[in-house]
Amino acid sequence: MARACEICGKGRQVGYNVSHANNRTKRVWLPNLQYITVIEGKSRKRLRVCTKCIKKGKVQKAV
């Protein structure tokens, strides 16, 4: 899954830029993804995780 959090699944959102004249053009919002090393069991994994999951403590960083 490209450009999506591997913990919560948060991906891109689509919508419109709306001008003062109410002209609409498509645009995309991407989540703030970071590569972090995570300890799962006895192994280390490199995951793409959104910053919200890191702040909430859903993932424990490997030190």
Image: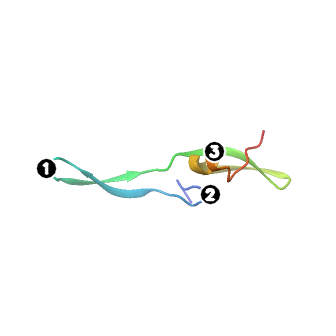
Residue furthest out toward the top: 63
Q: Which mark is residue 34?
A: none
x and y percent of residue 42 in the render? 86, 53
Query: Which of disc 2 and disc 1 is earlier in sequence?
Result: 2
Question: What amino acid is found at the position of numbered circle 2 in the picture?
Answer: Glu
Q: Which residue is mark 1?
A: 21
Q: Residue furthest front?
A: 56
Q: Residues within 10 Å of mark 1 (few under 14, many from 20)?
A: few
Q: Is residue 21 left or right of residue 9?
A: left
Rate crowding at label 2 as few (under 14), some (14 to 19) or many (20 or more) other CA atoms within 10 Å: some
Residue 16, given in percent of the width and then of the height, sits at 29, 55
- Distance Cα–Cα, label 1 vs label 2: 39 Å
Left or right: residue 13 compared with residue 58 = left
- Quadrant position of the C terminus in the picture: top right
Give the residue at x 62% y 57%.
Answer: 6
CA distance for labels 1 and 3: 40 Å
Query: Disc 3 versus disc 2: distance between alpha carbons?
Result: 10 Å
Residue located beneath label 2 in the image: 6
Label 3 is placed on what type of residue? Tyr
Residue 59 point in image, percent of width and height: 69, 51
Q: Viewer-proximal residue, 50 or 3? A: 50
Asked whether the beta carbons under mark 1 and mark 3 sit within 8 Å of each other, the answer is: no
Q: Which residue was labeled with disc 3? A: 35
SS at badge 1:
loop
x and y percentages locating residue 33 in the rendered image: 56, 47
Q: Secondary structure at mark 2?
A: loop
Q: Residue at x 62, y 46 (%)?
A: 55
Please state, as top left, top right, bottom left or bottom right, where the N terminus lies in the image: bottom right
